[in-house]
């Protein structure tokens, strides 16, 4: 147990005795507190020396209860906050008494705020104190080569050597509170953990098992001790747990949490500094890993920079290196594009591509992982075209022959109407098939027939999937005849069309597919700036790289419509200068962490996801169905960031 002041008491009550633990058991304020609640302190006989009542070390008193009325709270003058918990076999009451350090005449009784809030979160998560097992919860596989386990393993081995024979146990969880490591010197605790289904890969967060030193440490983001009845579920009340988060020294992000657990009666405040020291050792090893990676990346950059005329850049987790040629070539938005290209180096350590930079320059880029630098990557740029300024709106681009019909398809919000107007121009006649419901099928059909009978100009039918079935043959006849106006159609993805509408769409061989915004991460910077100019032509703003990266990695279920709404919020608050994360709506200020997948990787992602769903998350069966090894499947799940299984 941890005691933050000299006047802090922990009281556990039974029917006629209570066990009180305090730092200075003979201090006057402590005696006064006991007297005010009707307790006569009696020194317990035959206590071990470590639990003496000398007042110099933590003391343990057995106290005989005086008269405690039914309305206990009312008889406790100057005291507030009684916590009691009913459970099978009796009633347990925990009182915390904090006396005033000035005169000892007043105090308060209340649960620790962090425990109080943790219990409230546990209730909101639907956890019951009688929780018996978590077999229905998903268990993920742990990567033994993960950065956290690599750094922690030597420290854990040293801790095991020191804790063997002490009846204490060790637990390590990742930042998502998934168990990565378990070691038990106390069989009772191992039995409890197994009975609850808390094995490797299981979630031990507050949302699964309520208040505990691992989950609560993640929530509070600082070290915490949870004693006995402070645990939320009954199974943990026999134990005292010490948990402390592990932070990466460079990024300051929480990487995981380390815990020491023992029988509540054996609680020792010296375990807290022992745990903190172990956490510091793990953090130092994480730092050493980072330093070694940075040194390797710096060496590779210095070697590549010998050719001063070649644009070279190096990107690591928290480091960016460029030579003068690259500094002149790259703009802030290009660094977000480079990080997205880095995400594609999961399957192969190097690749080449031709990309367009923010300046409009087309460059050939070769990127490769640097050995020993983690995800550190070297970039070599070779310009293939002179930089040119891009116009806010691309010119009208003819597609196919003048009389060839064109189909523009994509999910809602991908800009189908905008693309149609870009191609056909403002002089075309536009028919929104959704108007047929309001205008009436006959009136809409008559107007459509009349226009298709006139071969002049262009006609664009928007939202063809909403065209009444009876009017589909009218459009089919016009296409078959080949004598009508230039025809354009916009619709949803072909895979979602059915019946006559699918037949109509497949008649058109000239097609433009508009990809969802989530798959256009490399274009997000350009798209966003174009939308900003549409929203406010006078806006003179610049999107900094962190903003571009945040926007580029979001799922965007509303596609361009959603992005436009976000940027409308931005231009309302900023019309000039740098757009930072704080200028975005709060829900959009952090990256979703989703990788941008294209082509074969997207197909692979979808195939693995479908197999896992068919196999109810069973990875062995899914691997067999896909014809790959279980190890390969795990590697691809990590690389493609497939979660939930």
Image: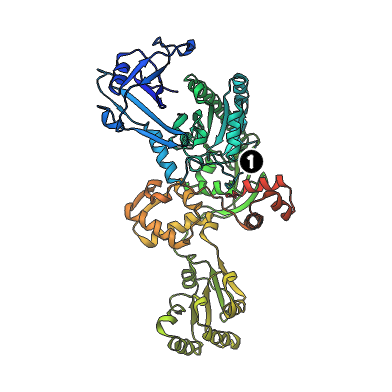
Determine the residue positioned at 67% across, 45% down: 635
The answer to whether any part of residue 255 appears in the image is: no
Asked if residue 6 lies left or right of residue 226, the reply is left
Determine the residue positioned at 42% across, 42% down: 121
Mark 1 secondary-structure assignment: strand
- Count of marks, rendered view: 1
- The quarter of the image holding the N terminus is top left
Q: Residues within 10 Å of mark 1 (few under 14, many from 20)?
A: many
Asked if residue 315 lies left or right of residue 349, the reply is left
Q: Quadrant of residue 356?
A: bottom right
Determine the residue positioned at 52% across, 77% down: 488
Q: Position of residue 4 (x, y in %)?
A: 38, 22
Q: Nearer the viewer, residue 53 or 527?
A: 53
The answer to whether any part of residue 236 appears in the image is: yes
Q: Position of residue 71 (x, y in %)?
A: 29, 33
Q: Which residue is mark 1?
A: 369
Determine the residue positioned at 61% across, 44% down: 140
Q: Nearer the viewer, residue 109 or 562?
A: 109
**Vertical relation: 244 (above or below) 131:** above
Q: Position of residue 424 (x, y in %)?
A: 49, 75
Q: Nearer the viewer, residue 31 or 302?
A: 31
**Vertical relation: 642 (above or below) 62:** below
Q: Nearer the viewer, residue 645 or 503?
A: 645
Q: Position of residue 60 (x, y in %)?
A: 43, 17
């Amino acid at each position: 147990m941890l005691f933050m002041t000299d006047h802090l008491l922990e009281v556990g009550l039974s029917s006629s005795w209570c066990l009180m633990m305090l730092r200075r058991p003979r201090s006057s304020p402590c005696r006064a507190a006991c007297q005010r609640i009707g307790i006569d302190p009696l020194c317990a006989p035959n206590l071990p020396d470590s639990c003496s009542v000398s007042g110099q070390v933590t003391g343990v008193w057995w106290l005989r209860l005086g008269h405690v009325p039914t309305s206990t709270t009312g008889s406790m003058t100057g005291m507030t906050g009684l916590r009691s918990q009913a459970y099978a076999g009796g009633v347990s009451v925990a009182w915390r008494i904090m006396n005033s350090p000035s005169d000892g005449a007043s105090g308060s009784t209340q649960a620790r705020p962090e425990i109080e809030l943790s219990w409230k979160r546990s209730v909101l998560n639907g956890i019951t104190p009688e929780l018996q097992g978590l077999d229905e919860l998903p268990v993920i596989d742990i990567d033994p080569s993960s950065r956290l386990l690599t750094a922690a393993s030597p420290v854990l081995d040293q801790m095991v050597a020191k804790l063997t024979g002490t009846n204490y146990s060790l637990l390590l969880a990742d930042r998502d509170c998934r168990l990565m490591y378990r070691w038990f010197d106390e069989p009772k605790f191992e039995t409890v953990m197994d009975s609850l289904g808390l094995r490797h890969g299981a979630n031990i967060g507050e949302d699964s098992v309520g208040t505990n030193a691992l989950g609560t440490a993640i929530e509070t983001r600082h070290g915490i001790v949870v004693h006995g009845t402070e645990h939320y579920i009954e199974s943990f009340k026999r134990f005292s747990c010490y948990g402390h988060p592990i932070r990466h020294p460079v990024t300051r992000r929480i990487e995981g949490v380390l815990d020491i657990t023992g029988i509540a009666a054996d609680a020792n405040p010296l375990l807290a500094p022992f745990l903190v020291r172990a956490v510091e050792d793990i953090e130092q090893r994480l730092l050493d890993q980072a330093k070694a990676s940075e040194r390797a990346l710096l060496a590779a950059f210095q070697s590549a920079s010998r050719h001063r005329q070649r644009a070279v850049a190096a990107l690591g987790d928290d480091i960016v290196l460029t030579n003068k040629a690259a500094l002149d070539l790259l703009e802030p938005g290009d660094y977000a594009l480079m990080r997205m290209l880095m995400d594609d180096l999961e399957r192969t350590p190097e690749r080449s591509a031709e990309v367009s930079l923010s300046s409009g320059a087309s460059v050939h880029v070769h990127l490769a992982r640097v050995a020993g630098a983690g995800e550190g990557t070297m970039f070599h740029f070779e310009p293939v075209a002179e930089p040119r300024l891009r116009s806010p709106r691309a010119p009208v681009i003819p597609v196919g022959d003048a009389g060839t019909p064109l189909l523009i398809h994509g999910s809602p919000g991908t800009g189908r109407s905008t693309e149609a107007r870009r191609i056909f121009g403002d002089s075309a006649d536009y028919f929104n098939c959704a108007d047929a419901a309001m205008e009436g099928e006959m009136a809409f059909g008559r107007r459509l027939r009349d226009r298709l009978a006139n071969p002049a100009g262009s006609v664009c039918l928007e939202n063809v999937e909403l065209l009444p079935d009876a009017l589909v043959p009218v459009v089919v006849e016009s296409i078959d005849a080949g004598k009508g106006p230039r025809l354009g159609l916009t619709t949803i993805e072909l895979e979602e069309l059915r019946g006559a509408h699918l037949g109509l769409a497949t008649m058109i061989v000239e097609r433009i597919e508009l990809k969802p915004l989530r798959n256009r991460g490399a274009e997000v910077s350009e798209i966003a700036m174009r939308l900003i100019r549409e929203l406010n032509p006078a806006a003179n703003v610049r999107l900094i790289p962190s903003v571009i990266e945040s926007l580029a990695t979001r799922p965007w279920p509303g596609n361009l419509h959603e992005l436009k709404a976000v940027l409308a919020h931005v231009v309302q608050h900023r019309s000039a200068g740098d757009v930072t994360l704080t200028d975005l709506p709060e829900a959009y200020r952090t990256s979703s962490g989703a990788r941008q997948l294209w082509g074969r990787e997207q197909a692979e992602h979808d195939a693995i996801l479908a197999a896992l769903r068919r196999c109810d998350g069973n990875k062995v069966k899914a691997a067999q169905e896909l014809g790959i090894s279980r190890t390969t499947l795990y590697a691809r799940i990590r690389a493609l960031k497939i979660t939930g299984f």
